[in-house]
Amino acid sequence: MAKGNTDCLKNVKNLMIELDCSTATYMENQSFSDYLKIARRAHDWEVKSLDYFFEWFNDETKQLTAVPVNDKDQYKLVIIVRNVQKSGRITAEIKLIDTKTNKTEANFTLKGSDGDKNDYITLRDPMKDAGETLGKYLKKNVERKK
């Protein structure tokens, strides 16, 4: 699941989370905008999708809190959605980046469970799964090492 090192997060309290769908495809050969056209979507679906990530991530961790991108925290996870399948299942690359040096500290691969292609909050289920999975991983591999 992970390549690189997450030890940089040992003394970190907040971890910024960013969602990037700019290079996403639908069914490998269509644009992500084609996927968005399948059903009615919330205007702020990206923010609401990330809210699910925050909720499930923060439920799993004790010292590390997922927060929106800001100017004061140093590390961020960028969730780069690569593909969305007909079922709503996503594949994504997740990068842990030190924003002060722009260095990628770790990479994760995510294969999310089925979403709902007609969901008003476009990536609700995949972001819930990503938040829960990454929260458990970082709790085990960062928080327990403190």
Image (spheres, rainbow, N blue to C red):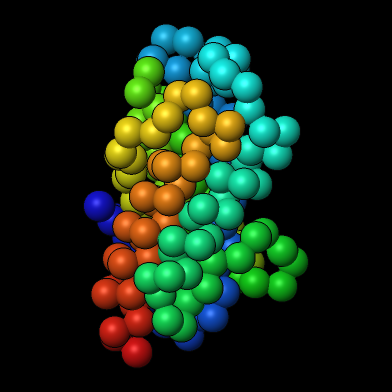
Residue 6 visible at all: no
Residue 114 visible at all: yes
Q: Residue 9: x percent and y percent?
A: 44, 76
Residue 2 lies in quadrant: bottom left
Q: Residue 61: x percent and y percent?
A: 40, 75
Is 15 on the left or on the right of 134, as rendered?
A: right
Is 91 on the left or on the right of 43, as rendered?
A: left
Q: Residue 112: x percent and y percent?
A: 33, 40
Residue 42 lies in quadrant: top right
Please tell me which residue is depicted at 30% across the width and 65% down the height of the picture: 137
Please tell me which residue is depicted at 34% across the width and 89% down the height of the picture: 146
| Residue reaching furthest to the bottom | 146
Q: Nearer the viewer, residue 31 or 56?
A: 56
Q: Nearer the viewer, residue 105 or 77?
A: 77
Is 37 on the left or on the right of 61, as rendered?
A: right
**Vertical placement of residue 4 versus 20, above or below:** below
Please tell me which residue is depicted at 57% across the width and 50% down the height of the picture: 50
